[in-house]
Amino acid sequence: MDSPRRREGPNVLNRPARRSTAGSRPGEAPDRRPRADRARQVADLIRQQLLSVGFEDDLLPDERLLSSQLGATRNAVREALDLLRQEGLIERLPGVGTVVVGQKVPHDLHRLMGLGEVLHEHGTVVNEVRTVGAVRPPLGVAHRLGLAEDSSVVYIERLRRLNGLPLSLDLTYLTAEVGEPLLHADLQRHDIFQLIEQTSGHRLGAAELTVEAVNADPHSAAVLGVPRGAALLMVERLSHFEDGSPVDLEYIRFRGDRLVMRAGTHRSAPSGPPEGADSTGSGR
Protein backbone atom coordinates (compact mmCIF):
# COMPACT_ATOMS: atom_id res chain seq x y z
CA MET A 1 0.00 0.00 0.00
CA ASP A 2 1.30 3.46 -0.79
CA SER A 3 2.24 5.42 2.31
CA PRO A 4 -0.79 7.47 3.37
CA ARG A 5 -0.38 11.20 3.45
CA ARG A 6 0.12 12.23 7.03
CA ARG A 7 -1.57 15.16 8.66
CA GLU A 8 0.27 18.00 10.26
CA GLY A 9 0.35 17.55 13.99
CA PRO A 10 2.50 17.75 17.07
CA ASN A 11 5.66 15.69 17.14
CA VAL A 12 5.41 14.24 20.59
CA LEU A 13 8.86 12.67 20.41
CA ASN A 14 10.70 15.91 19.74
CA ARG A 15 9.58 17.46 23.00
CA PRO A 16 11.46 17.17 26.29
CA ALA A 17 9.77 14.70 28.57
CA ARG A 18 7.77 16.58 31.19
CA ARG A 19 7.60 13.69 33.57
CA SER A 20 9.24 10.34 33.69
CA THR A 21 7.00 7.39 33.03
CA ALA A 22 9.54 5.12 34.67
CA GLY A 23 10.99 6.90 37.65
CA SER A 24 10.45 10.10 39.59
CA ARG A 25 11.90 13.53 40.10
CA PRO A 26 12.92 14.95 43.48
CA GLY A 27 9.79 15.48 45.54
CA GLU A 28 7.66 13.20 43.35
CA ALA A 29 6.39 9.80 44.34
CA PRO A 30 8.10 6.97 42.41
CA ASP A 31 6.15 5.36 39.60
CA ARG A 32 5.43 1.89 40.91
CA ARG A 33 3.26 0.73 38.04
CA PRO A 34 4.19 -2.57 36.38
CA ARG A 35 6.59 -2.15 33.50
CA ALA A 36 3.96 -3.54 31.14
CA ASP A 37 1.70 -0.59 32.00
CA ARG A 38 4.48 1.90 31.30
CA ALA A 39 5.32 0.09 28.06
CA ARG A 40 1.71 0.38 26.91
CA GLN A 41 1.80 4.11 27.63
CA VAL A 42 4.99 4.51 25.60
CA ALA A 43 3.54 2.42 22.75
CA ASP A 44 0.52 4.73 22.61
CA LEU A 45 2.75 7.78 22.20
CA ILE A 46 4.89 6.19 19.49
CA ARG A 47 1.81 4.90 17.65
CA GLN A 48 0.24 8.35 17.69
CA GLN A 49 3.41 9.81 16.20
CA LEU A 50 3.54 7.08 13.57
CA LEU A 51 -0.08 7.56 12.49
CA SER A 52 -0.05 11.36 12.48
CA VAL A 53 3.16 13.09 11.42
CA GLY A 54 5.27 9.95 11.03
CA PHE A 55 9.04 9.58 11.25
CA GLU A 56 11.68 10.91 8.89
CA ASP A 57 12.51 8.25 6.28
CA ASP A 58 10.17 5.89 8.21
CA LEU A 59 13.02 5.25 10.66
CA LEU A 60 12.39 5.42 14.41
CA PRO A 61 14.97 6.94 16.76
CA ASP A 62 17.11 4.42 18.62
CA GLU A 63 16.05 3.11 22.01
CA ARG A 64 18.39 5.45 23.89
CA LEU A 65 16.91 8.54 22.24
CA LEU A 66 13.35 7.28 22.60
CA SER A 67 14.00 6.67 26.29
CA SER A 68 15.24 10.23 26.70
CA GLN A 69 12.44 11.83 24.69
CA LEU A 70 9.68 9.88 26.40
CA GLY A 71 11.09 9.85 29.91
CA ALA A 72 10.97 6.07 30.02
CA THR A 73 13.42 3.32 30.82
CA ARG A 74 15.11 1.43 28.02
CA ASN A 75 13.28 -1.71 29.09
CA ALA A 76 9.88 0.01 28.86
CA VAL A 77 10.78 1.37 25.42
CA ARG A 78 11.92 -2.05 24.28
CA GLU A 79 8.65 -3.64 25.41
CA ALA A 80 6.67 -0.85 23.73
CA LEU A 81 8.45 -1.53 20.44
CA ASP A 82 7.65 -5.22 20.83
CA LEU A 83 3.95 -4.32 21.15
CA LEU A 84 4.07 -2.23 17.99
CA ARG A 85 5.96 -4.98 16.19
CA GLN A 86 3.21 -7.44 17.12
CA GLU A 87 0.68 -5.00 15.64
CA GLY A 88 2.57 -5.11 12.35
CA LEU A 89 3.49 -1.42 12.42
CA ILE A 90 7.27 -1.65 12.79
CA GLU A 91 10.10 -4.09 12.25
CA ARG A 92 13.69 -4.31 13.39
CA LEU A 93 16.16 -4.58 10.50
CA PRO A 94 19.78 -5.56 11.25
CA GLY A 95 22.17 -2.75 10.39
CA VAL A 96 19.31 -0.32 9.77
CA GLY A 97 17.26 0.04 12.94
CA THR A 98 13.55 0.05 13.66
CA VAL A 99 11.54 0.96 10.58
CA VAL A 100 7.88 1.56 9.85
CA VAL A 101 6.49 -1.33 7.79
CA GLY A 102 2.75 -0.97 8.32
CA GLN A 103 0.61 2.06 7.59
CA LYS A 104 -2.97 2.84 8.51
CA VAL A 105 -5.00 5.17 6.34
CA PRO A 106 -7.19 7.75 8.10
CA HIS A 107 -10.95 7.52 7.62
CA ASP A 108 -12.72 10.71 8.70
CA LEU A 109 -16.24 10.35 10.05
CA HIS A 110 -17.28 14.01 10.11
CA ARG A 111 -18.78 13.89 6.58
CA LEU A 112 -21.04 11.41 4.82
CA MET A 113 -18.80 10.11 2.03
CA GLY A 114 -18.07 6.91 0.16
CA LEU A 115 -14.79 5.07 0.70
CA GLY A 116 -13.37 6.16 -2.65
CA GLU A 117 -14.13 9.79 -1.81
CA VAL A 118 -12.59 9.53 1.66
CA LEU A 119 -9.39 7.79 0.55
CA HIS A 120 -8.76 9.38 -2.84
CA GLU A 121 -5.55 11.00 -1.56
CA HIS A 122 -4.17 7.65 -0.48
CA GLY A 123 -4.63 5.62 -3.65
CA THR A 124 -7.19 3.85 -5.79
CA VAL A 125 -10.18 2.02 -4.35
CA VAL A 126 -11.40 -0.87 -6.52
CA ASN A 127 -14.46 -2.95 -5.67
CA GLU A 128 -14.77 -6.68 -6.24
CA VAL A 129 -18.52 -7.29 -6.50
CA ARG A 130 -19.14 -10.67 -4.90
CA THR A 131 -22.95 -10.67 -4.87
CA VAL A 132 -25.64 -8.38 -6.27
CA GLY A 133 -29.36 -8.88 -6.73
CA ALA A 134 -32.88 -8.55 -5.30
CA VAL A 135 -33.58 -10.45 -2.07
CA ARG A 136 -36.17 -10.67 0.69
CA PRO A 137 -34.57 -8.71 3.55
CA PRO A 138 -34.20 -9.97 7.12
CA LEU A 139 -36.86 -8.47 9.37
CA GLY A 140 -34.33 -6.26 11.12
CA VAL A 141 -33.17 -4.80 7.80
CA ALA A 142 -36.73 -4.19 6.60
CA HIS A 143 -37.50 -2.39 9.85
CA ARG A 144 -34.42 -0.15 9.63
CA LEU A 145 -35.27 0.79 6.04
CA GLY A 146 -38.91 1.45 6.91
CA LEU A 147 -40.20 -1.33 4.65
CA ALA A 148 -42.96 -3.89 4.94
CA GLU A 149 -41.90 -7.41 5.85
CA ASP A 150 -42.73 -8.76 2.38
CA SER A 151 -40.78 -6.03 0.56
CA SER A 152 -37.81 -6.66 -1.71
CA VAL A 153 -34.42 -4.97 -1.40
CA VAL A 154 -31.25 -4.95 -3.47
CA TYR A 155 -28.34 -6.64 -1.72
CA ILE A 156 -24.73 -5.90 -2.72
CA GLU A 157 -21.63 -7.52 -1.24
CA ARG A 158 -18.24 -6.05 -2.16
CA LEU A 159 -14.63 -6.64 -1.25
CA ARG A 160 -12.96 -3.24 -1.38
CA ARG A 161 -9.26 -2.91 -2.07
CA LEU A 162 -6.99 0.07 -1.65
CA ASN A 163 -3.99 -0.01 -3.97
CA GLY A 164 -4.64 -3.70 -4.54
CA LEU A 165 -4.77 -4.73 -0.86
CA PRO A 166 -7.98 -5.88 0.86
CA LEU A 167 -9.36 -3.17 3.12
CA SER A 168 -13.05 -3.85 3.79
CA LEU A 169 -15.95 -6.23 3.22
CA ASP A 170 -19.17 -4.27 2.65
CA LEU A 171 -22.68 -5.72 2.91
CA THR A 172 -25.24 -3.23 1.58
CA TYR A 173 -29.05 -3.29 1.58
CA LEU A 174 -30.85 -0.74 -0.61
CA THR A 175 -34.54 -0.02 -1.00
CA ALA A 176 -35.76 -1.47 -4.30
CA GLU A 177 -36.55 1.92 -5.78
CA VAL A 178 -33.00 3.11 -5.17
CA GLY A 179 -31.17 -0.18 -5.67
CA GLU A 180 -32.66 -1.53 -8.89
CA PRO A 181 -31.11 1.19 -11.12
CA LEU A 182 -27.71 0.18 -9.67
CA LEU A 183 -27.96 -3.43 -10.85
CA HIS A 184 -26.44 -2.46 -14.19
CA ALA A 185 -24.19 0.36 -12.94
CA ASP A 186 -20.40 0.24 -12.69
CA LEU A 187 -20.14 -0.95 -9.09
CA GLN A 188 -16.52 -1.93 -9.56
CA ARG A 189 -15.15 1.57 -9.97
CA HIS A 190 -17.69 3.82 -8.26
CA ASP A 191 -18.93 4.37 -4.72
CA ILE A 192 -22.55 3.43 -4.13
CA PHE A 193 -23.23 6.89 -2.70
CA GLN A 194 -22.25 8.52 -5.98
CA LEU A 195 -24.36 6.09 -7.98
CA ILE A 196 -27.39 6.60 -5.73
CA GLU A 197 -27.30 10.35 -6.23
CA GLN A 198 -26.71 10.07 -9.98
CA THR A 199 -29.51 7.58 -10.65
CA SER A 200 -32.10 8.89 -8.18
CA GLY A 201 -31.58 12.60 -8.69
CA HIS A 202 -31.66 13.10 -4.91
CA ARG A 203 -28.94 14.06 -2.50
CA LEU A 204 -28.01 12.00 0.52
CA GLY A 205 -28.37 13.98 3.70
CA ALA A 206 -27.32 12.26 6.92
CA ALA A 207 -26.52 8.88 8.42
CA GLU A 208 -26.67 7.05 11.73
CA LEU A 209 -23.36 5.40 12.50
CA THR A 210 -22.24 2.72 14.93
CA VAL A 211 -18.63 1.53 15.25
CA GLU A 212 -17.50 -1.48 17.24
CA ALA A 213 -14.63 -3.95 17.40
CA VAL A 214 -15.37 -7.51 16.30
CA ASN A 215 -13.36 -10.64 15.64
CA ALA A 216 -13.09 -11.92 12.09
CA ASP A 217 -15.39 -14.86 11.45
CA PRO A 218 -14.07 -17.60 9.11
CA HIS A 219 -15.77 -16.14 6.01
CA SER A 220 -14.66 -12.56 6.64
CA ALA A 221 -11.15 -13.70 7.52
CA ALA A 222 -10.80 -15.63 4.26
CA VAL A 223 -12.07 -12.74 2.15
CA LEU A 224 -10.01 -10.05 3.88
CA GLY A 225 -6.87 -12.17 4.12
CA VAL A 226 -6.54 -12.10 7.91
CA PRO A 227 -6.36 -14.87 10.52
CA ARG A 228 -9.58 -16.07 12.08
CA GLY A 229 -10.34 -14.01 15.12
CA ALA A 230 -8.30 -11.02 13.91
CA ALA A 231 -9.50 -7.60 15.06
CA LEU A 232 -11.85 -5.83 12.65
CA LEU A 233 -13.61 -2.49 12.84
CA MET A 234 -17.32 -3.07 12.27
CA VAL A 235 -19.35 -0.11 11.01
CA GLU A 236 -23.12 -0.12 10.77
CA ARG A 237 -24.40 2.86 8.79
CA LEU A 238 -27.97 3.81 7.88
CA SER A 239 -28.01 6.61 5.30
CA HIS A 240 -30.95 8.87 4.50
CA PHE A 241 -31.92 11.21 1.71
CA GLU A 242 -32.14 14.89 2.56
CA ASP A 243 -35.87 14.46 3.21
CA GLY A 244 -35.05 11.95 5.95
CA SER A 245 -36.16 8.76 4.18
CA PRO A 246 -33.81 5.78 4.78
CA VAL A 247 -32.31 4.27 1.64
CA ASP A 248 -29.03 2.48 2.40
CA LEU A 249 -28.14 0.15 5.28
CA GLU A 250 -24.54 -1.07 5.38
CA TYR A 251 -22.53 -3.46 7.49
CA ILE A 252 -18.84 -2.81 6.82
CA ARG A 253 -15.93 -4.81 8.20
CA PHE A 254 -12.61 -2.96 7.99
CA ARG A 255 -9.22 -4.51 8.56
CA GLY A 256 -8.10 -3.06 11.87
CA ASP A 257 -4.46 -3.14 10.81
CA ARG A 258 -4.97 -0.92 7.77
CA LEU A 259 -7.35 1.83 8.83
CA VAL A 260 -7.86 4.29 11.67
CA MET A 261 -11.08 6.26 12.16
CA ARG A 262 -11.12 9.90 13.20
CA ALA A 263 -13.82 12.37 14.14
CA GLY A 264 -14.08 15.78 15.75
CA THR A 265 -16.52 16.37 18.58
CA HIS A 266 -17.74 19.41 20.51
CA ARG A 267 -18.95 19.59 24.08
CA SER A 268 -22.36 21.22 24.26
CA ALA A 269 -23.58 23.38 27.12
CA PRO A 270 -24.88 21.31 30.04
CA SER A 271 -28.65 20.94 30.09
CA GLY A 272 -28.87 21.06 33.87
CA PRO A 273 -27.06 22.69 36.80
CA PRO A 274 -23.40 21.78 37.36
CA GLU A 275 -22.79 18.72 39.46
CA GLY A 276 -23.10 19.62 43.13
CA ALA A 277 -25.09 22.80 42.47
CA ASP A 278 -28.38 23.47 44.22
CA SER A 279 -31.05 23.04 41.54
CA THR A 280 -33.55 25.04 43.63
CA GLY A 281 -31.59 28.23 43.02
CA SER A 282 -31.26 28.93 46.73
CA GLY A 283 -27.49 28.76 46.54
CA ARG A 284 -27.32 26.33 49.44
Image: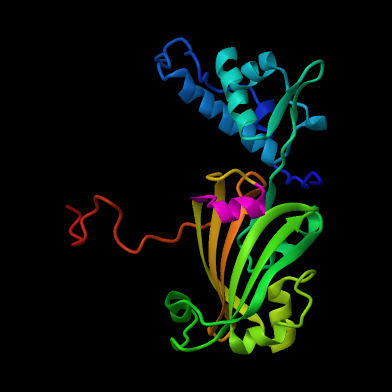
Instruction: Give the answer, above or below, for where 24 lies relative to 85.
Output: above
Rendered location of residue 143, percent (x, y): 43, 80
Rendered location of residue 109, percent (x, y): 61, 60
In this view, the residue in front, 11 or 180, is 180
Q: Residue 242 in magenta?
A: no
Residue at figure coordinates x 54%, y 68% from the top left: 237
Question: As drawn, which residue projects farthest toward the top?
Answer: 26
In this view, the residue in front, 268 or 283, is 268
Instruction: Give the answer, above or below, for where 121 lies relative to 208.
Output: above
Please, which colouring scheme is shown? rainbow
Q: Is residue 72 left or right of residue 118?
A: left
The reply to whether residue 10 is visible in this rendering is no
Rendered location of residue 204, percent (x, y): 63, 79
Residue at figure coordinates x 48%, y 76% from the top left: 141
Residue 149 quadrant: bottom left
In this view, the residue in front, 27 or 280, is 27
Residue at figure coordinates x 59%, y 55% from the top left: 220
Q: Which residues are magenta?
A: 214-225
Instruction: Give the answer, above or below, for where 2 lies relative to 272.
Output: above
Q: Is residue 189 left or right of residue 261?
A: right
Rendered location of residue 81, percent (x, y): 62, 24
Residue 62 quadrant: top right
Q: Residue 215 in magenta?
A: yes
Q: How many numbered tags mark residues here?
A: 0
Q: Is residue 48 left or right of residue 22?
A: right
The reply to whether residue 53 is visible in this rendering is yes
Residue at figure coordinates x 71%, y 82% from the top left: 183
In this view, the residue in front, 265 or 269, is 265
